[in-house]
Amino acid sequence: MPTDDLPETFHVTTDEQLRAVSNLTRHRIMAVLRFEPATITQIAERVGLAKGSSSYHVRLLERAGLVKVVRTRKVRGVTERYYAMAARSIALPDPGEGGPDVLMRHAVADLEASPADGERHVRMAHLRLTEEQFAELGARLQALADEYRELSDPSLPDASLVFALFHPARREQTEGDAK
């Protein structure tokens, strides 16, 4: 299924949808379906699940509207369904104060599961920016991610890009803290 047929963004708005995307196994299933449709058997093999577990998680994603059946075919009298993402990207709600950031939890879990001997570029930088610089950097990072997403080739291995630009919570200065 060409990704040109997909809506650009699916906005997670309900508790059912949020529960569906909050699960790490379902997150990994959605990663399998990111670039091309797959059957329950293919999903199970790629994620390392039993077919029954894979089917259960895909049904929950389908019920939440995050994935959909894009084609079917008969194989030895059984209807095989191919599932794909319902949109090119998923927009999660702001976690709110003190709420779990599902996206970052999944990103860290994926990073920890990646091969330790593989090439990785992981950096953290603490910056002091004006509001204008902050907004400009956010826009530039988004544009760069969009540019490379357009270049993505489903025949190539997956690469994940995660960025977070935020103002950390202010901590109360205690006696003896240096400015």
Image (cartoon, grey):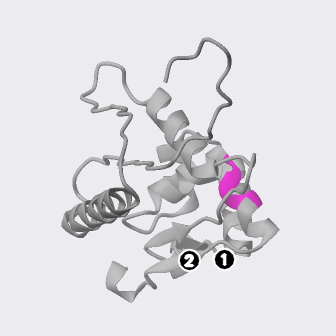
Circle 1: residue type: Gly
Question: Do residues under tags 1 and 2 come within 8 Å of each other at their CB atoms?
Answer: yes
| Secondary structure character of the magenta stretch overall | helix
Residue at the image point whose x is 58% and y is 16% from the top: 177
Q: Residue furthest right?
A: 15
Tell me the number on the disc at residue 65. 1
Residue at the image point whose x is 55% and y is 41% from the top: 168
**Residue 91 drawn above or below residue 104:** below
**Residue 115 drawn above or below residue 6:** above
Asked if residue 173 is among those painted magenta in the image, a careful observer would answer no
> Which sits in the foreground, 113 or 130?
130
Question: Which quarter of the rendering shows the N terminus?
Answer: bottom left
Circle 2: residue type: Phe
Q: Which residues are magenta?
A: 19-23
Q: Residue 103 appears at what percent x and percent y? A: 57, 51
> Does residue 65 appear to the left or right of 69 in the view shown?
right
**Residue 72 visible from this viewpoint:** no
Asked if residue 20 is among those painted magenta in the image, a careful observer would answer yes
**Residue 87 visible from this viewpoint:** yes
Secondary structure beneath label 1: loop
> Which sits in the foreground, 121 or 76?
121
Please give the residue where the numbered disc 2 appears in the rendered image: 10
Q: Residue furthest top?
A: 176
Question: Which circle's residue, 1 or 2, is located before the other in the chain?
Answer: 2
Tell me the number on the disc at residue 130. none
Nearer to us of marks 1 and 2 is 2
Q: Residue 36 appears at what percent x and percent y? A: 38, 67
> Which sits in the foreground, 169 or 147?
169
Q: Quadrant of residue 117?
A: top left
Q: Quadrant of residue 57?
A: bottom right
> Does residue 92 appear to the left or right of 119 in the view shown?
right
Residue at the image point whose x is 61% and y is 42% from the top: 49
